[in-house]
Image (cartoon, helix red, strand yellow):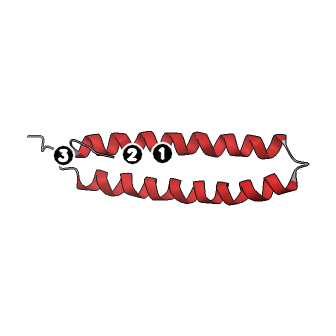
Amino acid sequence: MSAESSKDFIHKNRLVLKELRETFINLKIIVKTIPHYKNVNICLDKEIKENNELISIFVKTIQTAQGKVIKPKRN
């Protein structure tokens, strides 16, 4: 991911975070709609856990990047 500025970096990471959250919801829907396939659910539990870990990473990345963006002072 190449960003042209700090604000662009934050924006692009927010887009990734949005997609990860949508993926989380879609995985949960799949698990709820296919309850009788235990092997699928076991596999998706691993994917859901990994998705949550990625969400945490991107949330922290955004928070850190926002803290480093220098905001102009108001007089």
Q: Mark 1 highlights which residue? A: 17
| Disc 3 to disc 1, C-alpha distance | 23 Å
- Mark 3 secondary-structure assignment: loop
Circle 2 or circle 3, nearest the eye: 2
Specify whether 28 is left or right of 51.
Answer: right
- Front residue of 74/14: it is 14
Q: Is residue 68 above or below residue 11?
A: below
Specify whether 25 is left or right of 41.
Answer: left
Three-letter residue code for mark 2: Asn
- Mark 2 secondary-structure assignment: helix
Circle 3 or circle 1, nearest the eye: 1
Which residue is at 37% across, 51% downward? 62
| Quarter assignment of residue 29 | top right
Three-letter residue code for mark 1: Leu
N-terminal of the pair, mark 3 or mark 1, is: 1
Three-letter residue code for mark 3: Lys
- The reply to whether dot 2 and dot 1 touch (C-beta < 8 Å) is yes
Within 10 Å of the Cα at label 3, are there few (<14), some (14-19), or many (20+) other Cα atoms?
few
| Disc 2 to disc 1, C-alpha distance | 6 Å
Q: Mark 2 highlights which residue? A: 13
Q: Mark 3 highlights which residue? A: 71
- The picture places residue 70, in percent across and down from the top left corner, at 18, 50
- The picture places residue 22, in percent across and down from the top left corner, at 59, 39
N-terminal of the pair, mark 2 or mark 3, is: 2
Q: Is residue 42 above or below residue 16?
A: below
Which residue is at 54% across, 45% downward? 20
| Quarter assignment of residue 68 | bottom left
